[in-house]
Image (tube, rainbow, N blue to C red):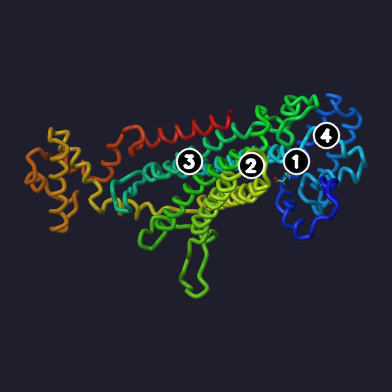
Amino acid sequence: MKLWEGRFTEPSAKNADDFNQSLSFDYKLYWHDILASIAHVKMLGETQIIPKEEAETIGDNLVNILADIEKGKLTIEGAEDIHTFVENELVKRIGVKGKKMHTARSRNDQVATDLRLYTKDSIVNVSNHIKNLITTLLDIANNNVQYIMPGYTHMRKAQPVSVAQYINAYSEMFLRDLERFTDCYKRTDVMPLGSCALAGTDFPIDRRMTASLLSFSEISQNSIDAVSDRDFVAEYIFCCSTLMAHLSRFCEDLIIYSTDEFGFIEISDAYSTGSSIMPQKKNPDIPELIRGKTGRVYGDLTAILTVIKGIPTSYNKDLQEDKGALFDAEDTVLACLSIFTDLLKNISFDTRKMRFAAGGGFTTATDIADYLVQKGMAFRDAHAVTGQIVRYCIENNKTLDKLDLFVYQNFSSLFDEEILQRVKVGKSVEARKVIGGSARSAVRENIRSITRRLNRMFKE
Ligand code: ARG
């Protein structure tokens, strides 16, 4: 049965019903829809808007409906949307009393409430997945503080860095993602129920009671806005999008670093794929798919932003399209976080190759320039002198750490014995003791700081 047939003389067309329905996707809201209804009828009973015994009967039956769905005894089908489905089922079980559930409520504030409850739970779930990922990264970082790899800018060797410092860079990104989700939670944690269709209600409802039963921290303050505010959905998908951007960049690195040409890391067979034609191939399909699915989540963000940009004030049916974007972004992010964390637990580093690569490409040239500056030369001049030394090495097929002191001294009289140490890769990494730098002490402090911030986020 439809909830709105009264004023119509003709039944709706089958294809109009099919087009209008949302049950095929909003069934996912069943848990939160029933929960919100249980709180709503409890409040209706407490405020004596409906008789208390009737409220209790409705509440008990809603609990049973929920249990039956959970046990697979009740299939969600045959209604326009999840709200209609639950109400029809209730009326089937307790007759006309069930129809009182919708007193002082509209599907407009109902769906907005369901979606906020759902999104709050989803934020908690995604955040736990991010926490697992960061914990895995911290383990990897802890085991690799002493190892050195080339750091790149413009995808060209730049300066040597610690492997742990590189891994920590991603932990920092994922920590920011966690913070973004936590912040999004605050704005999602506002209850619209009681806004009804758009104007509020003339029943003496107790919105604070319902909000506290549903663990909402705040209640919305303007009913017209509350029924059509989907900013939280857009914000949630934006949080998903930045998270995916970070996963995608990491995947890009792993794909490059696991090539024969680099050979820095090995992705285990369990998380690799083969080729149907080339027997020798071991392909990184999983990181490639995560990189690809990033585009999909960006698509969800574009979808929700486009849905909300054109609707006139208050509820419009366009908003039904919020769910596809939200659910798809959520499913994609959860799948990617799970598989990526497992994949990371199964990679190994070839620290010898990384160390060797860090020595090529004149990665300690900046150390030479800095050395000259410390001896009194202006940085611009030091940069130019060092450039000439690098050119000399290229032309004579030499490396910076293999040059004799007198060669250095031909370029500047400021050089002494110490330069022969300073151009060593290990010394270069250790020299950067600044907060956030590559020295072991700084990297260990970075690990401690990430751990502290992570723990703090989960204490609140
Ligand atoms: N299925 C609808 C949605 O997702 C529920 C709200 C319907 N409200 C209405 N006035 N038709 O937005």
Amino acid type indicated by mark 4: Thr
**Residue 21 sits above or below residue 450 on the image:** below
* Earlier sequence position, callout 4 versus callout 2: 4
Q: Which residue is mark 1?
A: 107
Give the structural element (helix, strand or loop) at label 1.
helix
Amino acid type indicated by mark 3: Leu
Disc 2 to disc 1, C-alpha distance: 22 Å
Residue 74 coordinates in the image, percent (x, y):
84, 50
Disc 4 to disc 1, C-alpha distance: 11 Å
Give the left or right position of residue 95, taking residue 231 as reference.
Answer: right
Nearer mark to the viewer, of 3 and 4 = 4
Amino acid type indicated by mark 2: Ser
Disc 3 to disc 1, C-alpha distance: 46 Å
Q: Residues within 10 Å of mark 4 (few under 14, many from 20)?
A: some
Give the structural element (helix, strand or loop) at label 4.
loop
Is there CB contact under 8 Å for labels 4 and 1?
no
Give the structural element (helix, strand or loop) at label 3.
helix
* Earlier sequence position, callout 2 versus callout 3: 2
Disc 4 to disc 2, C-alpha distance: 29 Å
Residue 429 coordinates in the image, percent (x, y):
30, 41
Q: Nearer the viewer, residue 194 or 126?
A: 194
Q: Nearer the viewer, residue 351 or 183?
A: 183
Q: Nearer the viewer, residue 138 or 47?
A: 47
Q: Which residue is mark 3?
A: 138
* Earlier sequence position, callout 3 versus callout 1: 1
Q: Residues within 10 Å of mark 3 (few under 14, many from 20)?
A: many
Q: Which residue is mark 2?
A: 122
Disc 2 to disc 3, C-alpha distance: 24 Å
Disc 3 to disc 4, C-alpha distance: 52 Å
Q: Is residue 342 visible?
A: no
Specify whether tag 1 is near ligand 1 (CB below 8 Å).
yes
